[in-house]
Image (tube, rainbow, N blue to C red):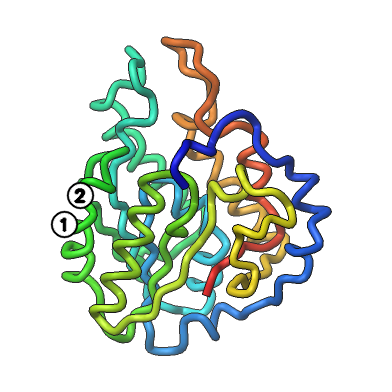
Amino acid sequence: MNANPIQGQGTSPQAWKASQRLAQVADVDCTQLVPEGSRAVIIAPHPDDEVLGSGGLLQLLARAQRQILLISVTDGAASHPGSGYWTPQRLSIVRPQESADALKRLGLPPSQVQWVHGGFPDTGVAAAEVALREFLKTYLQPSDVVFATWREDGHADHEAVGRAALSAALECGARAHEIPIWAWHWASPEDPRIPWERARKLQLDKWMQARKRHAIQAFASQLYEDPDTGHEPVLSSTAVERLQQPFEVVFL
């Protein structure tokens, strides 16, 4: 996607709830996606993407006793450009802390999760895509199952992470799947740009939904207006609600 499609309030959660295409998406079991003996690798462009897109998947993986490698590509330091309060320096410390708090809220056993920080530039991942691919290859194993943001998600960092992850997985012989996050904002409920034939749903029980909701609340820097500039939150209440369905979607 060329022009920035992430503007305004986006498609309403109610519209997605009424979507026939989304209703027809078949379920998939977490243990089918990540067979016994395989490790799940979750690749998040920014601290919060791992919970927004995969907070339920992470819980399902923990329940299935799968090993998890979480790779945070950037530290999210560019989320508030021009802010005197949320400076890049402050964000680079706070946002990874928010992620750590969110992972605790999901109830993930520390023994099951390895966490790597890539240190790539927030909003500049596309320019570092080749370096990111090589970085990812140093961590991937042929038996891994990789989950990255969709390469057509509408956010430049998300798309670059998706491309680099798919390319690295292919070179390493690992399987790779994609997770839409911002697509729920710009796409329409029956949108032909969504690869519906590749979409599968991971169903979340009410406790998993509650833990994911609680975990999302850890990202305070993204959920409240900027005290310096008065700018709207990065994640509006509508955006958060869209990502709190009783299921998560994966593109196989």
* Residue at screen point 71% across, 71% down: 25
Q: Is residue 82 above or below residue 145?
A: above
Mark 1, Cα crowd under 10 Å, few <14 / some 14-19 / many 20+, is some
**Is 174 located above or below residue 228 in the figure?**
below
Q: Name which quarter of the figure residue 87 lies in.
A: top left
| Front residue (pair 179, 119) | 179
Disc 1 marks which amino acid? Ala
Identify the residue at horizontal 24%, vertical 78% (top origin). Answer: 171
Q: Position of residue 122 (x, y in %)?
A: 29, 39
Q: 10 Å neighbourhood of mark 2: few (<14), some, or many (≥20)? A: some
Q: Nearer the viewer, residue 141 or 36?
A: 141
Residue that protrudes farthest toward the bottom in the picture = 36
Indicate the position of residue 106 as horizontal and vertical percent values: 52, 56
Q: Is residue 28 left or right of residue 136?
A: right
**Dot 1: element:** helix
Q: Quick one: SS at disc 2?
A: helix
Q: What distance separates the C-alpha of mark 1 from that of mark 2?
A: 5 Å
Give coordinates of residue 21: x percent, y percent.
75, 64
Q: Tell me if 233 is positioned left or right of 237 in this view.
A: left
Q: Toward which corner of the image does residue 38 lie, by quadrant?
A: bottom left
Picture residue at 61% right of the left edge, 60% below the top: 194
User: What's the mark number on residue 44?
Assistant: none
4 is higher (above) or lower (below) than 32? above
The residue to which callout 2 is attached is 128
Residue 252 x/y as whole percent: 52, 75
Is 57 drawn above or below residue 39 in the view shown? above
Q: Mark 1–mark 2 contact, CB under 8 Å?
A: yes
> Of the residues shown, which amino acid type is indicated by label 2?
Ala
Q: Which residue is mark 1?
A: 131
